[in-house]
Image (cartoon, rainbow, N blue to C red):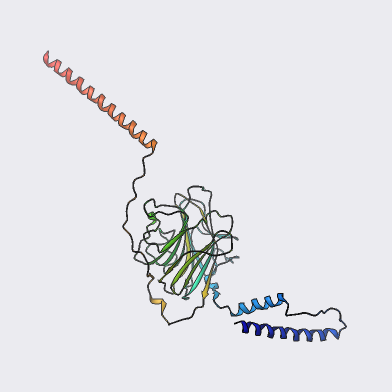
Amino acid sequence: MAKDIQQFCETYEQYQLNTLEKYKLARLSAGETNMYRKISFKSLPFQLIWLSIAFAAWNTKDYLKREHSVVKPYQASGISIPFWDFTGSVMITNSYIRLTPDLQSKSGAIWNNVPCMVSNWELQVHFKISGKGKDLYGDGMAIWYAKQPLTPGSVFGSMDYFHGLGIFLDTYANQNGPHNHGHPYISAMVNNGSLHYDHDRDGTHTELAGCEAKFRNADHDTHLSIRYEKDILTVSTDIEGKNAWQECFQVKGVRLPTGYYFGASATTGELSDNHDMISIRLYELEVPIEKEEDRSKIDPAAAFFAPPRDHVEDPPPPMSGTKLFLIIVCALLGLCVCVVCGVMVFQRSQESSRKRLY
């Protein structure tokens, strides 16, 4: 590789020198003798420039797939963007695609309408989740590689019992039992259509892996990378403004078919947030092919998928002081009513006995 780069630089340098000499001779005939100075293509800046050109030419590890990407400017025609469809409360602006506003009971999704035929890929998502709530907010966002696009449902605005891969950016903790974790939380789930995403347990019964990530209301850009290469799923984040990926989790033995669709969805309930998508970029990864395989006919699967655990009910929350006080007051009132009724019944019985005696 080093020899190839050196040869490229030398060849390009000789070409530039020959071109410059021809141009100088043409201009010298016109009397312009003082406009040229000796240019050294062996200087460090020029070498760095041509070196970067060489690496750009030979580095074929990733190719941007424009038909699976959406970036600013969105080039919307009316309410549509080429290669992408929308559903629900989606709003397109010059700066972002808002899946849901900071309002209750909203749901929206954006889906690529071109099936992905790439076996090894990396999806880079620039997103923002923000809102006015300080302590209570929700519900979250999902990034999809799924068989059934544009199908609304209960899993962050998309369908349950899906086929494919879901990456969930959960901002509200529903689970208070033994499998709880901090929020916001990023997790992955692979489904062949037979598994239920248990939203009340934050999906902990069916997740492949997950990590806590403080991406909400960040003062800087927040990015997510989903890399699928040689049946290895790696999810990384750049949420601290350092322009560097930090691994969230990695799972081996994940098998995903080709021909599925990329998408993103979000939902709000009693709690709300703005869920914004700024850009989605898909890169094709060029890796050595050991053996040809028709990936279009396989089912989504994960070798290290943990089977669903028993649905254990959470312990009842402790009784609040106000509720306890109301219960005591009601009990006392009930006791008073019983005493009054008992006294009235006793008095009536006494009067009846006296009448019989007379």
Please determine whether, in this image, residue 33 is positioned above or below residue 113: below
What residue lies at 49% left-to-right and 78% top-to-bottom? Answer: 287
Extreme-left residue of the structure: 357
For the point 52% across and 75% down, the residue is: 284
Q: Is residue 181 left or right of residue 286?
A: left
Q: Position of residue 74 (x, y in %)?
A: 58, 65
Q: Is residue 34 visible?
A: yes
What's the residue at 31%, 57% (across, down)?
Answer: 310
Furthest toward the right, the residue is 31
- Residue 65: x and y in percent read 54, 73
Q: What is the quadrant of the C terminus in the image?
A: top left
Q: Is residue 130 left or right of residue 270?
A: right
In the rendered view, tell whether residue 266 sits above or below residue 83.
above
| Residue that appears at 56% across and 78% down | 60
Q: Check the image and report above or below for 176 versus 152.
A: above
* Quadrant including the N terminus: bottom right
**Quadrant location of residue 336?**
top left
> Residue 128 lies in what quarter of the image?
bottom right
Q: Position of residue 167 (x, y in %)?
A: 45, 63
Taking the view exactly as shown, the residue that stands out farthest to the top is: 358
Q: Is residue 220 above or below residue 341?
A: below
Q: Is residue 186 visible?
A: no
